[in-house]
Image (cartoon, rainbow, N blue to C red):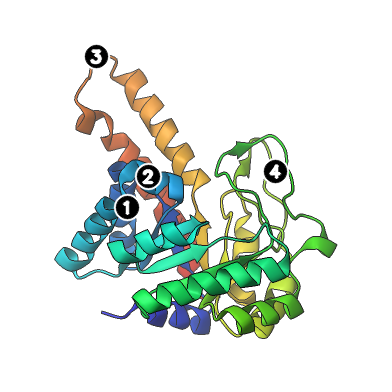
Amino acid sequence: MKSLKELILEADKNKVAIGHFNVSELTALKGIFQAAKNLNQPVIIGVSEGEREFFGTKQIAAVVKSLREEFNYPIFLNADHTRSLEKAREAVEAGFDAVLFDAGKLPLEENIKKTKEAVELVKNINPGVLVEGELGYIGSSSVVLEDVPEGAVIKQEDMTKPEETAKFVGETGVDLIGPAVGNIHGMFKNAPNPRLDTERIKKIREAAGVPLVLHGGSGILDEDFILAINAGISIIHINTEIRLAWRQGLEKTVSENKEEIVPYKLLGLVVEEIRDLVEARIKLFSEKS
């Protein structure tokens, strides 16, 4: 089986993207894994610090490892939005394949300093674990939004700059980078998210010299996904859409089965809703234009 790094580099070369989907419990994981297997595409499972706390860091690592080994399948695990060295260490020692160290809200020099410390820590424990840095703040919550998150970068002049990216990668040694290019975490209730600056993505990819990750994928127009992938995005994060499908599937099945109390019977529709959503996303991300 190819490593995560090999698959990301292949995606970068072939102008496709690997889907990264967040979970906090087994139902979503089941739906995501079914979708990936149905399409025979690699998949990355993400768990933020809060999601890890709920699921259990060692527990989610054990479950993903068991799926990879039992089915000989390229499913990988990322410690999403990790903000401390302690949490980074915990994830690597548990067996995660990648760590996003998120100091994107900090000024550039401080971000470089802290991310470099994280890279050194992770690589000293396990050189094979990929480390991603984040350059530019895009909000912090995967929720349905009424307004743009306070402090999120949406103005052109505030977005990640190619020259800053080159400096950041060169001084930190990260394997991947997540830039601010018009993307935000969460999705708006009654409108698509802001358009992406795909020309900026292209320039950042050229300057960075490492694959790029698009955060805040929920709510982005399909057209922008295609443009972003062609410009240099190799991984796309989806979380809010997963949470929304989970909630809607549960509400529907409970309303239609008011007397049912068996969890696995109630959660079957939730798995289907998430599976269908993820299949559609993976198909879009993996189509060569």
| Distance CA(mark 1)–CA(mark 4) | 28 Å
Q: Is residue 52 above or below residue 252?
A: below
Provide the residue designation for mark 4. 149
Residue ID for mark 1:
57
The residue beneath circle 2 is: 53
> Is disc 3 surrounded by few (<14), some (14 to 19) or many (20+) residues within 10 Å?
few
Left or right: residue 240 compared with residue 277: right
Residue type marked 1: Thr
Image position of 97 with respect to 273: above or below? below
Q: Earlier in the sequence, mark 4 or mark 3?
A: 4
Taking 223 as reference, is 117 above or below it?
below
- Depth check, mark 4 against mark 3: the one in front is 4
Q: Nearer the viewer, mark 2 or mark 3?
A: 2
Q: CA distance from mark 2 to mark 1?
A: 7 Å
**For the residues carrying marks 2 and 4, which lies nearer the camera in this image?**
2
What residue occupies the far top of the structure in this picture?
A: 259
Residue at 37 percent across and 44 percent down: it is 53
Name the residue type under label 4. Pro
Residue 283: where, in percent of width, then height? 44, 62
Given residues 228 and 83, the one toward you in this image is 83
Task: Inspect the image, locate mark 3, and give the three-letter code of the amino acid beneath it.
Answer: Glu
Q: Mark 3 highlights which residue?
A: 259
